[in-house]
Image (cartoon, helix red, strand yellow):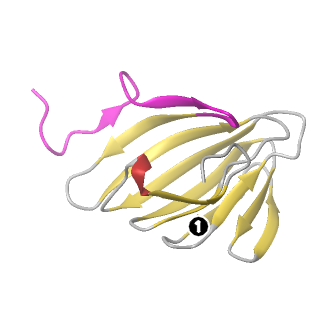
Amino acid sequence: MKKENDLSTNSGMEKEETPWGKWENLVEYKPGIGYKVKRITVKPKECLSLQKHQHRDEFWVVVSGAGRVTLDKDVFFLQKGKSVFIPKTVLHRVENPGDIPLIIIEIQTGEVLEEEDIVRIEDKYGRA
Protein backbone atom coordinates (compact mmCIF):
# COMPACT_ATOMS: atom_id res chain seq x y z
CA MET A 1 0.00 0.00 0.00
CA LYS A 2 1.26 3.44 -0.93
CA LYS A 3 1.72 5.99 1.84
CA GLU A 4 1.15 9.73 1.39
CA ASN A 5 4.87 10.47 1.39
CA ASP A 6 5.87 7.70 -1.00
CA LEU A 7 7.88 8.66 -4.06
CA SER A 8 6.20 8.02 -7.42
CA THR A 9 8.40 7.16 -10.39
CA ASN A 10 7.70 7.05 -14.11
CA SER A 11 5.65 3.85 -14.49
CA GLY A 12 2.16 5.01 -15.36
CA MET A 13 3.06 8.69 -14.93
CA GLU A 14 1.76 11.45 -17.15
CA LYS A 15 3.38 12.28 -20.49
CA GLU A 16 2.34 14.23 -23.55
CA GLU A 17 3.35 14.71 -27.18
CA THR A 18 3.20 18.39 -28.12
CA PRO A 19 3.68 20.42 -31.32
CA TRP A 20 7.19 21.35 -30.11
CA GLY A 21 8.25 17.92 -28.81
CA LYS A 22 7.23 16.02 -25.68
CA TRP A 23 7.39 15.95 -21.90
CA GLU A 24 7.10 13.20 -19.35
CA ASN A 25 6.95 13.14 -15.58
CA LEU A 26 9.85 11.23 -14.08
CA VAL A 27 9.22 11.76 -10.35
CA GLU A 28 6.42 13.33 -8.38
CA TYR A 29 6.10 13.93 -4.64
CA LYS A 30 3.39 16.20 -3.27
CA PRO A 31 2.45 16.26 0.41
CA GLY A 32 2.20 19.96 1.28
CA ILE A 33 4.83 21.78 -0.72
CA GLY A 34 6.03 19.21 -3.19
CA TYR A 35 8.11 18.71 -6.26
CA LYS A 36 7.87 17.16 -9.69
CA VAL A 37 10.68 16.15 -12.07
CA LYS A 38 10.07 16.18 -15.83
CA ARG A 39 12.05 15.36 -18.94
CA ILE A 40 11.33 17.93 -21.66
CA THR A 41 12.41 17.22 -25.25
CA VAL A 42 12.26 20.12 -27.71
CA LYS A 43 12.50 19.26 -31.41
CA PRO A 44 15.08 21.11 -33.53
CA LYS A 45 13.89 24.59 -34.60
CA GLU A 46 10.89 24.48 -32.20
CA CYS A 47 10.03 26.37 -29.00
CA LEU A 48 7.74 26.33 -25.98
CA SER A 49 5.19 29.09 -25.48
CA LEU A 50 6.15 32.30 -23.71
CA GLN A 51 4.56 31.53 -20.35
CA LYS A 52 4.50 31.99 -16.61
CA HIS A 53 3.18 30.13 -13.58
CA GLN A 54 1.30 31.47 -10.59
CA HIS A 55 2.06 28.63 -8.15
CA ARG A 56 5.40 27.05 -8.98
CA ASP A 57 9.09 27.74 -9.48
CA GLU A 58 11.08 25.78 -12.05
CA PHE A 59 14.73 24.80 -12.32
CA TRP A 60 15.96 23.68 -15.75
CA VAL A 61 19.13 21.69 -16.43
CA VAL A 62 20.16 21.08 -20.05
CA VAL A 63 21.31 17.47 -20.47
CA SER A 64 21.57 17.36 -24.28
CA GLY A 65 21.80 20.02 -26.96
CA ALA A 66 21.62 23.76 -26.32
CA GLY A 67 18.72 26.13 -25.89
CA ARG A 68 17.96 29.82 -26.15
CA VAL A 69 16.16 30.88 -22.97
CA THR A 70 13.97 33.93 -22.51
CA LEU A 71 13.67 34.92 -18.84
CA ASP A 72 11.62 38.11 -18.55
CA LYS A 73 13.55 40.55 -20.78
CA ASP A 74 16.83 38.59 -20.77
CA VAL A 75 17.71 36.18 -23.58
CA PHE A 76 20.69 33.82 -23.24
CA PHE A 77 21.94 30.40 -24.30
CA LEU A 78 22.17 27.34 -22.07
CA GLN A 79 24.56 24.57 -23.07
CA LYS A 80 24.67 20.99 -21.83
CA GLY A 81 25.37 20.94 -18.09
CA LYS A 82 24.14 24.51 -17.50
CA SER A 83 21.01 25.48 -15.57
CA VAL A 84 18.60 28.30 -14.83
CA PHE A 85 16.16 29.03 -11.98
CA ILE A 86 12.74 30.38 -13.03
CA PRO A 87 10.75 31.99 -10.19
CA LYS A 88 6.96 31.82 -10.30
CA THR A 89 5.25 34.69 -12.20
CA VAL A 90 8.36 35.31 -14.35
CA LEU A 91 7.83 35.07 -18.12
CA HIS A 92 9.95 32.37 -19.71
CA ARG A 93 10.45 30.28 -22.82
CA VAL A 94 13.03 27.91 -24.28
CA GLU A 95 13.81 27.53 -27.97
CA ASN A 96 15.89 24.92 -29.73
CA PRO A 97 17.82 26.65 -32.52
CA GLY A 98 19.95 23.54 -33.09
CA ASP A 99 19.76 20.48 -35.31
CA ILE A 100 19.47 17.88 -32.52
CA PRO A 101 16.78 17.51 -29.85
CA LEU A 102 17.18 19.72 -26.78
CA ILE A 103 16.62 17.73 -23.58
CA ILE A 104 15.97 19.50 -20.30
CA ILE A 105 15.37 18.08 -16.85
CA GLU A 106 12.85 20.35 -15.15
CA ILE A 107 12.35 20.40 -11.39
CA GLN A 108 9.13 22.07 -10.27
CA THR A 109 8.50 23.14 -6.68
CA GLY A 110 5.40 24.73 -5.21
CA GLU A 111 1.86 24.21 -4.02
CA VAL A 112 0.31 23.55 -7.46
CA LEU A 113 2.24 21.36 -9.88
CA GLU A 114 -0.43 20.86 -12.55
CA GLU A 115 -0.38 21.77 -16.24
CA GLU A 116 -3.34 24.09 -15.57
CA ASP A 117 -0.89 26.47 -13.86
CA ILE A 118 0.53 27.45 -17.27
CA VAL A 119 -0.43 30.98 -18.35
CA ARG A 120 0.50 31.26 -22.03
CA ILE A 121 1.27 34.78 -23.25
CA GLU A 122 2.49 33.94 -26.77
CA ASP A 123 2.35 30.62 -28.61
CA LYS A 124 3.12 29.90 -32.25
CA TYR A 125 0.81 26.87 -32.13
CA GLY A 126 -2.31 28.94 -31.28
CA ARG A 127 -2.67 27.82 -27.64
CA ALA A 128 -2.31 31.28 -26.00
Range shown magenta: 1-22
With 125 as the anchor, is 39 left or right in this view?
A: left
Quadrant where the image shows the C terminus? bottom right
Q: Residue furthest bottom?
A: 73
- Nearest to the observer: residue 127 or residue 81: 127
Query: Where residue 77 appears, x then y in whole percent?
Result: 82, 60
Q: How many marks?
A: 1
Q: Is residue 6 above or below residue 110?
A: above
Query: Where residue 5 appears, x then y in whole percent?
Result: 18, 45
With 91 as the anchor, is 82 left or right in this view?
A: right
Q: Residue furthest front?
A: 126
Task: Answer whether residue 29 is visible to the viewer in this image.
Answer: yes
Q: Is residue 15 magenta?
A: yes
Residue at left offset 75%, top offset 61% = 69
Residue at left offset 41%, top offset 51% = 116
Q: Residue furthest top?
A: 11
- Quarter of the image for residue 46 reads top right
With 128 as the anchor, is 75 left or right in this view?
A: right
- Tell me the residue that label 1 is attached to: 85
Residue at left offset 45%, top offset 35% = 26
Query: Where residue 66 appears, x then y in whole percent?
Result: 81, 48
- Nearest to the observer: residue 73 or residue 2: 73
* Mark 1: amino acid: Phe
